Image (spheres, helix red, strand yellow):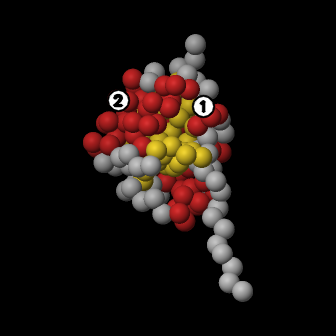
């Protein structure tokens, strides 16, 4: 069986260590990264990358800058952007650049862990999901703004 490799990039040590432990419990070989550069360097060194959880605000980059690079190098990876900011514009931007899951911290951590365990390696059902304080739900696309007559 091929190892499942994961990256958890978060500059907050408590969040990073918690998610690293959860993903290890879910059967991943996990690399924790404090910066986007560290995450990208690790992603270059591993084949295949199965999962990457990237914080929206890292010291050297935004998640929306890192995700496209990860998507290009690892098209099949499950890519997750984690943030405390659940603004609709950010959600739409994140899905537009290639994420699979938009996770609102800290509410989505345990939900992600549970869903990854249940998926048993078949992550297709997790793509296009939002995980926040209201629970998991499918991403429905860019919100249409009402037009005024």
Tell whether label 1 touches label 2 (CB within 8 Å): no
Determine which of the numbered discs, if any, sits on residue 20 in the image.
none
Between 112 and 53, the residue placed more toward the observer is 112
Can residue 125 be seen at all in this image of the molecule? yes
Disc on the earlier residue, 2 or 1: 2
Extreme residue toward the bottom, this view = 149
Which residue position is annotated with label 2?
21
Extreme residue toward the left, this view = 14
Q: Quadrant of the N terminus?
A: top right
Position above or below: 43 against 96: above
- At 49% across and 54% down in the image, what residue appears? 63
In which quarter of the view is residue 94 placed? bottom right
Between 84 and 51, the residue placed more toward the observer is 84
Q: Quadrant of the C terminus?
A: bottom right
Position of residue 67 measured from the top left corner of the image (x, y, whole percent): 56, 49
- At 35% across and 29% down in the image, what residue appears? 21
Determine which of the numbered discs, if any, sits on residue 123 in the image.
1
Q: Residues within 10 Å of mark 2 (few under 14, many from 20)?
A: some
Position of residue 30 measured from the top left corner of the image (x, y, whole percent): 43, 29
In which quarter of the view is residue 143 placed? bottom right
Position of residue 96 measured from the top left corner of the image (x, y, whole percent): 64, 57
Q: Secondary structure at mark 1?
A: loop
- At 44% across and 24% down in the image, what residue appears? 26
Position of residue 93 measured from the top left corner of the image (x, y, whole percent): 58, 61
């Amino acid at each position: 069986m091929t190892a499942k490799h994961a990256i958890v990039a978060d500059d907050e040590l408590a969040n990073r260590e918690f998610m690293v432990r959860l993903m290890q419990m879910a059967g991943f070989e996990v690399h924790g990264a404090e910066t986007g550069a560290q995450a990208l360097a690790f992603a270059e060194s591993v084949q295949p990358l199965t999962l990457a959880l990237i914080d929206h605000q890292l010291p050297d980059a935004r998640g929306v800058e890192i995700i496209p690079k990860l998507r290009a190098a690892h098209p099949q990876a499950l890519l997750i952007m984690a943030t405390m900011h659940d603004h609709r514009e950010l959600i739409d931007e994140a899905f537009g650049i290639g994420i699979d899951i938009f996770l609102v911290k800290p509410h989505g951590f345990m939900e992600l862990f549970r869903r990854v365990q249940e998926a048993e390696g078949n992550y297709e059902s997790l793509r296009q999901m939002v995980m926040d304080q209201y629970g998991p739900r499918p991403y429905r696309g860019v919100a249409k703004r009402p037009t005024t007559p």
